Image (cartoon, coloured by chain):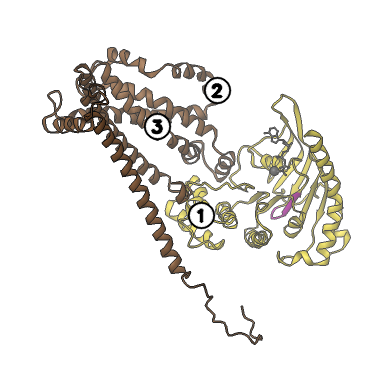
Amino acid sequence: MSGQQTSDMLAPPVPEFRPGTSDAEIEAAAARAERKRRLTVRFWQVLLLVVLLGGWEVLARAKIIDVFFFSSPSAIAERLVQWITQGADGTPLWFHVWVTIEEALLGFFSGFILGILAGVALGRNRMASDVLTIYIKVFNSVPRVVLAPIFILLFGLGLTSKVALSFVMVFFIVFSNAFQGVREADRALIANARILGASKWQLTRSVIVPSAMSWIFASLHVSFGFAIVGAIVGEFVGARHGIGVLIQIAGGAFDTAGMYAAIVIIMVVALVAEYAVTILENRLAKWRPVPLPDTQ
Amino acid sequence: MTERNAAPSSPSAPAGARAPAIELIRVNRRFVTPDGKSMTALRDFTMTVDDGEFVAVVGPTGCGKSTTLNLITGLDRPSGGEVRLYGNPVDGIDPRIGFVFQTDALFPWRNVIDNVVAGPLFREKDRSEAYALARRWLARVKLSGHETKYPHQLSGGMRKRVALAQTFINEPRILLMDEPFSALDVQTRVLMHEALLALWSESGASVVFVTHDLEEAITLADKVYVLTAGPATVKSVYRIELPRPRVAAEIRYQQDFIDISHTIWNDLRDEVMKGAARSEAAA
Ligand SMILES: Nc1ncnc2c1ncn2[C@@H]1O[C@H](COP(=O)(O)OP(=O)(O)OP(=O)(O)O)[C@@H](O)[C@H]1O
Ligand SMILES: [Mg+2]
């Protein structure tokens, strides 16, 4: 833009925009629109919740639905308050919750770590994986739930049997994802690392495992859910404490409010876990392209 | 540059006092295809790269250029014949080799500096020394200030410069490049040629540079190998006597450059046609 010779060089050096379209104004407008969109989403979310719970409560009070089967939000809230203040089944509520969380966490971490180790080891060893694949398939085809009574017999009513059930639930998911991730590792990256001087162990640690990580992470959310399922199913079959026990007792006493209250507790635990996993994932995978704001 | 200088010469180099950096002696490489058939990729392939020499390899697509480089790295072994580095047969991956890949081979989960430092750390150099070295190499490829970015945050040209730093930091005596710049636009490619020529003239490494682009080959190389459509053998070798240092941005407009590329293209064209006809028949 340096046409010094032209006579009509009166235009100012700053490019001119239509009024109301300067950079600052556009940015402010975009921020406003974004805020408004978020508020709208929030509004509808809350409204939907109020309508659902309110409708449930109204239908229950009007005796249109049978409270014996469906309970009502107020009864469930009452039961939750009662459990929190007076404990459930003669034990403080937090203790039941903690027992289930402990079982799920132990099962999750042991399953996760051993799943990765086994997946990477087998993914790196063609012969072993060819030999073992058939057996893994057979084990994997067993519905995990049927193992619950066996584990109770083997490990007793305490912690171990639930951890074992959680473990088998998590292990196979993480294992197969890790295995697949190792197999899919980019050949060019492997060749590059080897030529740069990586030993076999360095190659596994700094190329194979990181590139399998996105597969493993994909299984993280699902597998924590399964860890909780394992713990609770174990508690159904036989335990002294835990959320599963609360459901069991409430069911035995035809106390539907108690059963729904236990479900609410499980939902809260699962949501907190989901949140924690997301934070962990974001921290460990900061190298990945940021998803577009619209797709979040 | 006269026609004579760009004329085909004998593929085998005259015996020098020192062993050449790379020798492929009557190499064959056969693959077994997924349907169990044997397929010859290289046949009776002989090539010599002298110490400090820049060799470019051109040939139709699928003829066996990447296979040749893999044989030199030791990632792959010949079915017959011999590959030697400085007079010794290749046995495993040689630490004196550096390789720049066609596709992006940067580690996406490492930031720029951790990518560059990978080689020295794999080779168990001192950590702080390795990082200092990596910073120096990033400065040389003009990427200072981008240390903590991840590959996906860089442009294609910047990623290639990271790849160059990652390779050159190991100070390879032998540098293999497999169509390293083919994914870049023409302007960026010229800039990369300048960068590569500067790095190479300082390092004195021996280079094998595979490319589809004949002008790129002539711009960079001392010697251009033209391969036949697969199975690949050496069809002819051209010595490029253009004076150095060469200016990559200008050289392609010189008359002698144009003459050389005409001569070589006439030679290469037949093979490209043959290769194209064959892949059409196969499809
Ligand atoms: N591991 C392999 N197994 C079977 N066939 C292979 C293998 N690697 C290469 N080939 C075959 O060998 C031939 C030469 O392949 P190569 O990759 O060396 O070609 P190229 O000259 O590098 O091609 P391009 O220019 O497209 O990169 C091809 O026909 C290819 O299909
Ligand atoms: Mg190739």
Which is more foreground, mark 1 or mark 3?
A: 3
Q: Residues within 10 Å of mark 2 (few under 14, many from 20)?
A: few
Please identify the quarter of the rendering in which residue A254 is found: top left
Which segment did they paint magenta?
B51-57
Chain letter for the residue marked with disc 1 in the picture:
B
- Please give the letter of the chain rendered in brown: A
Sequence-first disc among 2 and 3 = 2
Chain letter for the residue marked with disc 2 in the picture:
A
Residue under numbered circle 2: A127
**Residue A54 x, y percent position in the rendering:** 26, 37
Residue under the point 55% across and 34% down: A184
Viewer-nearest residue: B89 or A60: A60
Q: Is residue B265 left or right of residue B194?
A: right
From this viewpoint, which residue is outermost toward the right? B4
Residue A149 in the magenta stretch? The answer is no
Which is more foreground, mark 2 or mark 1?
A: 1
Residue under the point 48% across and 50% down: A292
> Is residue B67 among what the camera can see?
yes
Residue under numbered circle 1: B153
Which label was assigned to residue A158? none
Q: Residues within 10 Å of mark 3 (few under 14, many from 20)?
A: some
Q: How many marks?
A: 3
The answer to whether mark 1 is within 8 Å of ligand 2 is no
- Inspect the image, locate mark 3, and give the three-letter code of the amino acid beneath it: Val
Viewer-nearest residue: B176 or A234: A234
- The verdict on a common chain for dots 2 and 3 is yes
**Residue B96 x, y percent position in the rendering:** 60, 47
Residue under numbered circle 3: A222
Question: Could you give the CA–CA distance between mark 2 and mark 3, rounded to whole angstroms?
Answer: 30 Å
